[in-house]
Image (tube, rainbow, N blue to C red):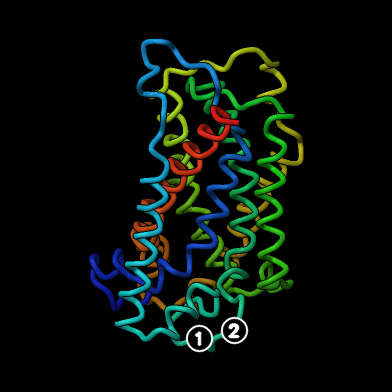
Amino acid sequence: MHESGDRTLTGTILNPIQFLREVPIAVAMVLFVFAAYGPPTRSVEPQRAKAAPVRYRGAFAGALLLVSTVFAIAASTHGPAAALNSLFQYTTRAGDTPVFGSHWQHHWLSTLWFGIATVLAARLGALVFGGPLPAARAARRPFERAAWLYFVLLTVVFGVSSLVATDPIRIGSQAREIATHGLITLPLALAMFAWLERRRGVVRAGGDAADAVHVAWYHVAFAIAIPMYLGVIVKASTVIEAGQTGGGLVAMAGAHFFEHALDYVFVALLIVGVYGHVQHSRSNP
């Protein structure tokens, strides 16, 4: 199942080193979801008042327990140094020479795309599928600043170079990330937010709906341009041949959906945790 063809399905899903590499990126994706929606709504239907509080401490504890357990497994299986190297983005693929920030750089364009695409997806969900209406821009602004500050800070720490847009390995990696997170993590995260809102029976009160669903032209342009560019390079170059697999595109992209199974759980727990924490803070200023 794995890209290299050396893992079973279970081994692909329960890969501790793989999960630890993704933790900083998963945190960025969760922040981008709240940047797109803004804070939880304040209004609650009276009959659902008892269901309003979200048990965010349990969600945070679950996320921490997941990371701690996986780290312990990785440290006992591969050694503490390998586990720490994964968290600090040293390696991306088995056999690579450890380079600080390598994994973040292999996912830079795809993470940037996620931050932009989340804005569009949240508004599309509100307009077409009856999902939560994003808060007004003023309410979203602190969350937007936090998300993009986190992205920029980690970019400064881990570094970035022109190779994210030219190196075949990085191109292929980022194309797979967009395919996986665009089709699974993004709708999952938005659905979690929508479920939490509906669980509380909330309806956004007041505000300008047109402002809430406004999308800048550059959001649309970059959300389309990044995957198109990566797709063209993948199709026109030796990206597939540069991968570790002999199974072609299906093996490289298909198995990738399963490699991130633990990430989906981690993201869902963080969505609940952040939502509940912000709701609690707004209810108890």
Looking at the image, residue 209 lies above or below residue 253: above
Which residue shows up at 49% across the image and 60% down it? 176
Of the pair 251 and 219, the residue shown nearer to us? 219
Mark in front: 2 vs 1:
2
Looking at the image, residue 49 lies above or below residue 190: above
Query: Disc 2 residue type?
Result: Val
Whether residue 238 is visible here, answered yes or no, is: no
Of the pair 34 and 218, the residue shown nearer to us? 34
Q: Quadrant of the C terminus?
A: top right
Which residue shows up at 48% across the image and 51% down it? 181
Looking at the image, residue 276 lies above or below residue 243: above
Task: Give the labeled residue for mark 2.
Answer: 99
Res 80 → quadrant: bottom left
Q: Position of residue 229 (x, y in %)?
A: 66, 57
Q: Residues within 10 Å of mark 2 (few under 14, many from 20)?
A: some
Query: Disc 1 residue type?
Result: Asp
Residue 65 is left or right of residue 43, and the answer is: left
Looking at the image, residue 44 lies above or below residue 87: above
Which residue shows up at 43% across the image and 83% down it? 82
Whether residue 253 is visible here, answered yes or no, is: yes
Of the pair 257 and 42, the residue shown nearer to us? 42
Q: CA distance from mark 2 to mark 1?
A: 8 Å
Q: Point out which mark residue 96 bears.
A: 1
Q: Quadrant of the N terminus?
A: bottom left
Q: Residues within 10 Å of mark 1 (few under 14, many from 20)?
A: few
